[in-house]
Every structure is written in C-alpha cells, then in structure tokens.
C-alpha cells in the first residue's frame, strides 16, 4: 500500500493500445493499492501532437515503446512532416517531447536503431531532443531489454537496447554515454535468471563519480559535446558493446532468434519499398 494513497491515485497516468497489456497494467496498479488507475485503453499515436496543451503534459515520463512496428499514413498524419515516420519507436519519441513539461524528466528504453539511425526523420527527432532538452545520459543496458510479456512469448528478447535519460531544463551541451555489461555469470536473461534492480548498481555508483573509462578498444564510459555529436551526424550509438565469442543456442532459442531477425529485416525492406512507392507516386 502506498504511503500517500491519494497522491498515487492522482499521479500515475498511462495509455495502452492492446487489450491484454491494458488489463495487466490495471491489475498491477490495483494490487499496489491504487484504487482508481488512470490508465486509458487507446492509441497514443492517434492524437495531433501540435494540439497538446499544458494540461496534457507530465512532470515525469517513463516509457518502453514497441520496436520494429510500422505505422500507416493515417497515424503519421498526426505529426509534423519533419517528424513523421513509419517507425513506431520514433513516433513515440516525438510524443514524449510534446508531452514533457518544463523542468520535467524522462527515461525511455529505445533500440539501437534509433541511436545510430541517420535518416532525415531520426536526425530531426534527435535535433529536437537536444535543442529542447538536456540529454543527460545514454546507457547501453546489457544489450538486452525486458519485453512486454504476453501469452506464448518469452519475457526477454535479444534486441539491443539503450536507456535515454533527459530533462526539459535547457538545451544539451554535453552527454555522457555508459555501457552497462551483462552481470557476471549471465549470458542472457530468462524467466529463471531475470533482470534485477541490483544489476544497475554499477552505473548508479559510477554516476556519483563520473569519469571516462576505456576497456581495450571500446569506451565503457565517455562524454561527448553537442558539437561532436552533430559532427557525427547525430549518431548516438557511442557506447557500443564489444564483439563477443559466438554463443551456441538451444534449437528453439535459435529458431526464435532467427524469426526475430527475419521480422526486423522484413520491416526494413517494407519501409524502403514504401518510400520508393511514395516517390514514384509523387512523380506520376
């Protein structure tokens, strides 16, 4: 039970598109003593971002948006042309930027594709992020993320991810990058060996005494100025993981990994074909 139940009931808000995760969110909050969960069943992307007012903004935003999804033109129409993209995670980043209050803070889990992507839309989103907010830290977290759990799917995937921490206080002047490696004795997370809060202790301890760390040829922690990031084309993939020896997976894990990689490749192909088709239609 929260110490201040009234405060919790009026402080936690969310919106979820899919029925099953929506029910899980409601149930989880009820079990933690929040009697009237402010969780809406809907799609955050179906609202014109330019129509958001101060009443629609939040002091703190925490998000693990879906990756690899491809949105249709009717969804993209709710965003300015320079920020409109079919990639779901990119659109959610724009929503966050429009819904974060002045002096507000945000933490967002994003795949590597957002960090190293240099297409026009991703660059525009990153420029907006760094012009309006202070990007404090980009943490490469284990190279793994805890995925939304649903019936029949594993709780963890092998998609490389990062956590961006930023606040709307002033434009970014410099940003720290930190690589958080897998805990000792772990090759990957699973239901029997789950990700735990204490696995983040190394980066928490480093934060109080920030310094650049070089391990072999790979920076484990490094600080870059905004000018350096701009000169690199706004590639934020600056705390990458060193190459590791090949891991031999169990047959079912290997099949699952192959299916994930095939889906990711198919999504990329679909996006390229959609852009080519759009260009051809413009010339007709």
Image (cartoon, helix red, strand yellow):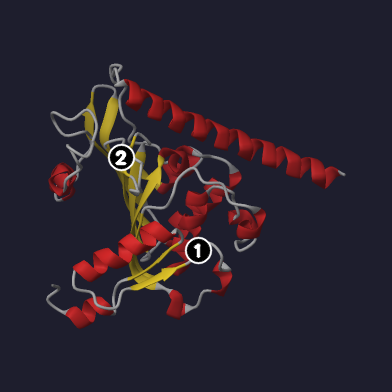
Which of the numbered marks, if any, corresponds to residue 70? none
The one nearer the camera, 65 or 121, is: 65
Looking at the rendered structure, the secondary structure element under dot 2 is strand
Q: Position of residue 207 (x, y in %)?
A: 18, 49
- Indicate whether 231 appears above or below 34: above
Quarter occupied by residue 278: top right
Q: Position of residue 210 (x, y in %)?
A: 19, 45
Spatial separation of the CA atoms under disc 2 and disc 1: 24 Å
Badge 1: how crowded within 10 Å, few (<14), some, or many (20+)? few
Looking at the rendered structure, the secondary structure element under dot 1 is loop
The one nearer the camera, 59 or 48, is: 48
Q: Position of residue 42 (x, y in %)?
A: 48, 66
Q: Identify the image quadrant of the N terminus.
A: bottom left
Residue at far right of view: 284
Please tell me which residue is depicted at 25% across the width and 64% down the height of the picture: 28
Please tell me which residue is depicted at 33% across the width and 27% down the height of the picture: 253
Q: Which residue is mark 2?
A: 156
Please tell me which residue is depicted at 59% across the width and 49% down the height of the picture: 86
Q: Position of residue 10 (x, y in %)?
A: 29, 80
Question: Residue 29 vs residue 124: left or right?
Answer: left
Q: Identify the image quadrant of the C terminus.
A: top right
Badge 2: how crowded within 10 Å, few (<14), some, or many (20+)? some
Q: Which residue is mark 1?
A: 43
Label 2 close to label 1 by CB (< 8 Å): no
The one nearer the camera, 94 or 77, is: 77
The one nearer the camera, 242 or 147, is: 147
- Indicate whether 147 appears above or below 10: above
- Indicate whether 117 appears above or below 57: above
Please tell me which residue is depicted at 65% across the width and 59% down the height of the picture: 74
Residue at far front of view: 152
Question: Residue 39 vs residue 245: left or right?
Answer: right
């Amino acid at each position: 039970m929260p110490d201040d139940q009234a405060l919790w009931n009026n402080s936690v808000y969310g919106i979820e598109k899919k029925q099953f995760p929506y029910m899980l969110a409601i149930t989880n909050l009820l079990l933690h003593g929040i009697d009237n969960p402010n969780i809406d069943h809907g799609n955050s992307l179906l609202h014109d971002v330019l129509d958001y007012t101060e009443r629609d903004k939040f002091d703190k935003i925490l998000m693990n948006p879906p990756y690899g999804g491809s949105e249709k033109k009717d969804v993209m129409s709710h965003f300015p042309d320079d920020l409109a993209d079919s990639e779901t995670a990119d659109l959610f980043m724009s929503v966050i930027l429009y819904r974060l209050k002045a002096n507000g803070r945000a933490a967002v889990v994003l795949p590597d594709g957002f960090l190293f992507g240099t297409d026009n839309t991703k660059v525009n989103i990153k420029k907006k992020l760094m012009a309006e907010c202070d990007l404090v830290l980009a943490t490469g977290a284990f190279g793994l993320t805890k995925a939304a759990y649903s019936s029949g799917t594993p709780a963890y995937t092998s998609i490389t991810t990062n956590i961006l921490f930023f606040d709307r206080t002033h434009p970014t002047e410099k940003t720290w990058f930190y690589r958080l490696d897998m805990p000792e004795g772990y090759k990957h997370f699973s239901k029997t060996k789950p990700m735990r809060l204490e696995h983040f202790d190394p980066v928490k301890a480093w934060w109080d005494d920030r310094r650049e760390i070089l391990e072999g040829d790979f920076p484990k922690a490094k600080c870059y100025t905004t000018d350096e990031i701009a000169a690199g084309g706004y590639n934020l993939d600056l705390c990458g993981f060193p190459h590791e020896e090949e891991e031999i997976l169990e047959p079912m894990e290997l099949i699952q990994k192959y299916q994930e990689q095939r889906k990711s490749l198919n999504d990329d192909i679909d996006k390229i074909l959609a852009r080519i088709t759009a260009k051809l239609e413009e010339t007709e």
